[in-house]
Amino acid sequence: MLKLISLTLKNLTRNRRRTVLTVLSVAVSLFLLGVLLSLYTAFYHRQAPDAQALRLVTRHKVSLTQEMPLYYGSRIAAIDGVENVIVLNWFGGTYKDNRPENMFPRFAAEPDKIFDIYREFKVPPEQLEAFKRDRQGIAIGSMVAERVGLELGDRITLKGDIYPFDPELVVRAIFEGPDDFNSFFHLDYLEEALPEGRQGHAGTFTIRLRSTDDAARVGREVDEMFRNAPAPTKTETEAAFALSFVEQLGNIKVFLMSIAGAVVFTIMLVSANTMAMTVRERTAEIGVLKTLGFRAGPLLAMILGEALLIALAGGMLGSALAFGVTQAMANVMVAFFAGFTMPLWGVPVCLAAALAIGVGSALVPAVLAVRTDIVSALRHTG
């Protein structure tokens, strides 16, 4: 056994360049697999923050582009378990130009309710009062203020696209929080500027619950209340609502798993080619070992062991890189990558994939080599 282990370790250093390149190729593939697992976890298994778990979002059942009557809000507020309801209308529009640094979400909302619904937002009391008093006031997140270069008292003009209106706004409040890349201005200001046919409609309602235990029941009651109305609704958790934007691209689960499978399969083919070259070079040596009395089983274990060590080294390196990179992204850019970290169960998954790569790439070449008779093996010139 010790001889086999010694031979396996020596074989790893015979062609150092090939070994290092193979380890790196496995590491890159397992790094990509780890990132995909992190995306999957962030989309489907991330635990919602306490504040988010207390919120539901109601939209038109058919599409987000369809609107609902504003009076839905008062009827939703009357449901048992509902603490507050706010209208959020996505304004869109353009600030200055379409460069990425000037793009940020803009919502028309009821100013008295925003910071009650979103209690994780922190804003100085004097700024909050100034925002509520000024019909043209806008509250922006600290991330927006820093990126765009806005300060309290600055005047900005948004060019409407969804709505035929160019609001002129004054920065009255700058808030901080986990989603401080948003901005809000007065819904009344927007409503008064719209033509009569566009007034009185809501894009979404955000519901704050008294308890997370009420979420499923309240959602059902809201949708049942408007089931036969001209504008039927769909109510879901805030996390599910956010995920629906991603799922518009297609079946994300299948997409991610397909990419993960393709990555593992591709690197398995690369590793198989490498191991086939390695085994061909050592066919004569295998014939000598068989002449010395080595059986097929130990020889097969030696070849597979070499492949497994290479794959395992690449798997450990790739897993460590994936864990470190995703953790760094989540820490540095909390707003965009919150929850985007490699789960602990992702490490054994990546290592298992590495072992599968090792076995799958070396099994066929190893079996063919050890089955070669001694004379044919000794005659092999590589």
Image (cartoon, rainbow, N blue to C red):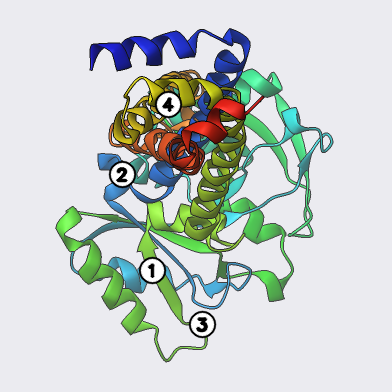
The crowd level at tag 2 (other Cα within 10 Å; few <14, some 14-19, many 20+) is: some
Instruction: Give whichever of discs 4 and 3 has the lower sequence position.
Output: 3
Disc with the residue nearer the chain's start (3 vs 2): 2
Secondary structure, mark 1, is: strand
101 to the left or right of 211? right
The residue that label 4 is drawn on is: 315
Q: Which residue is mark 3?
A: 231
Of the pair 163 and 322, the residue shown nearer to us: 322
Q: Is residue 379 visible?
A: yes
Above or below, comparing residue 352 to residue 321 in the picture: below
Disc with the residue nearer the chain's start (2 vs 1): 2
Q: Earlier in the sequence, mark 4 or mark 1?
A: 1
The mark found on residue 235 in the picture is 1
Task: State the CA–CA distance, disc 3 to disc 2.
Answer: 29 Å
**What amino acid is found at the position of numbered circle 1 in the picture?**
Thr
Circle nearer the viewer, 4 or 1 = 4
Spatial CA distance of label 4 from label 1 is: 42 Å
Q: Quadrant of residue 152?
A: top right
Q: Are dots 4 and 1 in contact, CB under 8 Å?
A: no
Q: Nearer the viewer, mark 3 or mark 2?
A: 2
Label 3 sits on a secondary structure element that is loop
| Residue indicated by mark 2 | 48
Instruction: Locate the C terminus by quadrant.
Output: top right
Where in the figure is residue 376, as x and y percent of width and height?
A: 56, 35
Residue 128 at x, y percent in the picture: 44, 30
Residue type at mark 2? Ala
- Label 4 and label 3: CA atoms lie apart by 52 Å
Mark 4 or mark 3, which is nearer to you?
4
